[in-house]
Image (cartoon, rainbow, N blue to C red):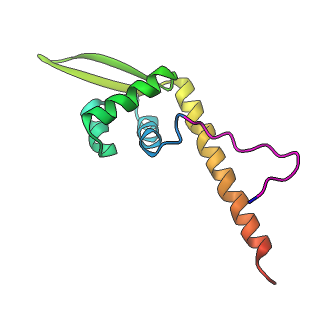
Amino acid sequence: MTARPGSTPPALDRELHHPTRLALAAYLSGCSEAEFAVLRDYCQVSDSTLSKTLSALERTGHVSVRKGYFGKRPRTWAALTLSGRRALQDHLAALEGIASAARRAAAAAEPE
């Protein structure tokens, strides 16, 4: 698919483009915060992978991480920030734009 002259490419967020990061942000968009183990299990990744993913999204300001205790056990919670929510919304809109453009191109290419 080629871009039309004067059109701008979709504004995909590089930090959310990776499937694990996108799944994590999407999950967090449905709650105020989530505990590390819940996120790990939802994304079906190792502790190390989730830790690295959270750190990357925290560096960009998409996610905030809070550490504390539940009883005597240390826990980590993550939340999608306001800028992270906006970034996810924009990323999903860009994906929908790509899908819509592909559908229009496919419909235009079909013989009548």
Q: Residue furthest bottom?
A: 112
Residue 12 in which image quadrant = top right
88 vs 21, nearest the viewer? 21
Using the image, determine if residue 75 lies above or below residue 103.
above
Residue 11 in which image quadrant = top right
Query: At which x and y percent is residue 70?
Result: 18, 20
The quarter of the rendered structure image containing the C terminus is: bottom right
Residue drawn at point x = 69 percent, y = 51 percent:
97
Residue drawn at point x = 54 percent, y = 24 percent:
82
Q: Main secondary structure of the magenta part?
A: loop
Using the image, determine if residue 2 lies above or below residue 51.
below
Residue drawn at point x = 33 percent, y = 18 percent:
66
Left or right of 90? Residue 36 is left
How many numbered circles are shown? Answer: 0
Query: At which x and y percent is residue 61?
Result: 51, 21
Q: Residue furthest right?
A: 5
Q: Is residue 100 magenta?
A: no
Q: Residue furthest left?
A: 72
31 vs 101, nearest the viewer? 101
> From which residue to which does the magenta span run?
2-14
Left or right of 105? Residue 33 is left
Residue drawn at point x = 54 percent, y = 31 percent:
85
Q: Is residue 5 magenta?
A: yes
23 vs 49, nearest the viewer? 49
Using the image, determine if residue 10 lies above or below residue 82.
below
The quarter of the rendered structure image containing the N terminus is: bottom right
Left or right of 56? Residue 112 is right
Query: At which x and y percent is residue 77?
Result: 31, 24
Left or right of 26? Residue 105 is right
